Every structure is written in structure tokens, then in C-alpha cells.
Amino acid sequence: MKVIRSIDNLRDELLQFNNQTIGYVPTMGFFHEGHLSLMNTARKETEIVVASIFVNPLQFGPHEDFEQYPRDEKRDLKLAKENGVDLLFMPDVNVMYPQESSITMQVVRRADVLCGRSRPGHFDGVVTVLTKLFNMIQPDKVYFGMKDAQQVAVVDGLITDLNFPIELVGLPTIREENGLAKSSRNVYLSEEETLEAKWLYRALINGRQLVVDGEKDPATIIDKVIQTIHQHTDGNIDYVELLSYPELQEVKLVNEQIILAIAVNFKRARLIDNLVFDKYGQIIERLK
Ligand code: AMP
């Protein structure tokens, strides 16, 4: 595995792989099994695997955790190597943003709901950095986790609108044994909160069960999820939403593929989770 920190080196290295298919895994590092599953799938499905670690300041709000975002470069290098990464791109902020930008990107659909509502500008930052990274790496396939399903929906819009010749893959959320979605931010949870946090997934499962049992009314399903979270955690609910997926529009009845998604604020961590399922409650784990 080669570790690369400059764009010139990245382009030089990529030249060698002429005509081979490239699978790309963008990340912010501090790897857990969620990241590793993306790398392993890319390894199976493409000839060359490129991963990047870049904590992108543009996608953090002024009061968010950019400075504190957990980092462990040494461990990440070892894990990337063990999980089949050929090139690991780790640029500094001044490599990615050497001067003040003359262009800004704005996401105008699929970004005014869920995390986009409570994190204004977040997805603008995500599409800006991804556009740069896609141009540098020119992958054939790009791998994202459905843990961040809104990100997958927004990137789907980016790839379509800007005609990137890239296939988008959304892979299943990897969870702890108790159901808690793995996240680099889980290290911020206290011991007690870690125990409570498993109820986020259980709340989603309770909501989905209503659909399996024939419930079609979004408000009833959302209520059940809210009730479960209130009953079992001290977290503050940021949102519980049920929307069409990937369009992320409100639905009157559950009659199509939908996302049931939650965000809950604990003392030091904001946790998100979701399930995407069809009108019968059948879970869709992988997109494409
Ligand atoms: P991050 O480093 O948090 O930006 O995440 C990098 C990629 O890993 C994104 O595509 C995430 O959706 C994905 N990811 C994060 N957590 C998980 C998880 N628990 N299961 C699957 N993918 C994940």
C-alpha cells in the first residue's frame, strides 16, 4: 500500500493503473468495521482500491467537532493495508484548499431535510470535496455506507447532475452486537450513553415492524419511534423522519421505498441511524 499526500503524486501513481478499474472509498479516518467493509467490498469488485482520509473543514459547522474529530493515523494506515487498499490518499487541508475558492457549490435538493436541516451547509461541503476527489481519482465505482443514507442520496444527485462516469454503491450499515451503528463518534459516548444508544436501532426496528404489520400512516410510525427513544434514553431527539428514498420527499402513506431516520443528541455525541425499506417493511441494505 502506498501512502500519498500530494495531488501530483496521486496522479503519478494512478497513471500506472491505466485501464484497470478503480474502486474508491472516501473517509474521514478513525476506522471501524464500517469503513473496512467498504474497503473489502471495493477489493472484491474492482482491480485497484483507493481510499482517502480527509477531515473536510467545509462540511463542519462553526460549533461542530472539526478540531476534536478523532484521529489515529498510525492505526488507520495499518488497517487500510490489512484490508486491501492499494493507495491511501491523506492530503492536508492546505493541499485540498490551497487558496480561497472562486466557486461554491450548493445542494438544492435532498438537503433541506434530516441532517441537512440541522447542519446547514454540511452537504455543500460534502459535494465540494467529493467533486475535487472524484476529479483527482477518477474512480469507476465509489463506495459509501447506508449509515449516512442522506449522503448517498445527495451523492447520487451529484453524480447524475455533473455527469461523473462513476457507479455509486451504498453498502449495509455495520453494527455492534447490540445493534448500535458503528461510528467514529461513538467514542464520545459515556458508558451509560453507550448502553442507551442501542435503543436508537431498536426504535427503528419498532417503527418498521408497524409497517410489516400493515401500518401506512407516517405519523403513527414516527410516534412509535419517538416513544421508544424517550422511554429508554436521555438523549435529545433532533429528528425522527419518514421520507421517500432516495428523493427524500414527504409521503402521505407508506406506499413506496422509504427511509425512517433519526438523529439523537447525547452530551458529547450526535448519533444518526436509519432503515431503508419498501412498503412491506422489507429492508433494503445495499443500493446497487
Ligand atoms: P466517515 O469517515 O464517517 O466520513 O465515513 C466514511 C464512509 O464510511 C461513509 O461512506 C460512511 O457512510 C461509511 N460508514 C460510516 N459508518 C458506517 C457503518 N457503521 N457501516 C457502514 N458504513 C459506514
Image: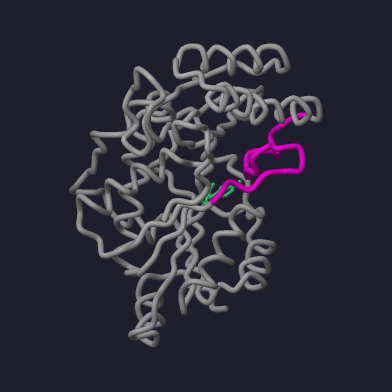
185 within the magenta span: yes
Task: Name the residue rendered at 43%, 44% in the picture.
Answer: 57
**Position of 150 compared to 87: left or right?**
left
What is the image's colouring?
one colour
Q: Is residue 216 magenta?
A: no
Q: Is residue 131 above or below residue 18?
A: above
When asked about the image quadrant of residue 167, the answer is bottom left
In the image, residue 138 sits, relative to residue 156, either above or below, namely below
Q: Tell me the magenta residue range.
A: 172-190
The residue most toward the front is 214
The structure residue drawn at horizontal position 45% and vertical position 36%, both measured from the top left corner, is: 278
Q: Relative to residue 114, is residue 282 drawn left or right?
A: right
In this rendering, the count of numbered labels is 0
Q: Is residue 41 above or below residue 152?
A: below
The quadrant of the rendering that contains the C terminus is bottom left
Image x and y of residue 193, in percent = 74, 26
Looking at the figure, which quarter contains the N terminus?
Answer: bottom right
Q: Is residue 90 above or below residue 285?
A: below
- Give the residue at x 64% y 40%: 181
Query: Which percent across, then down, holds residue 180?
Result: 69, 37
Q: Nearer the viewer, residue 276 or 237?
A: 276
Residue lying farthest to the right in this orientation: 191
Which is nearer the eye, 130 or 38? 38
- 90 or 264, which lies in front? 264
Magenta stretch: dominant SS? loop
Position of residue 47 measured from the top left corner of the image (x, y, whole percent): 46, 79
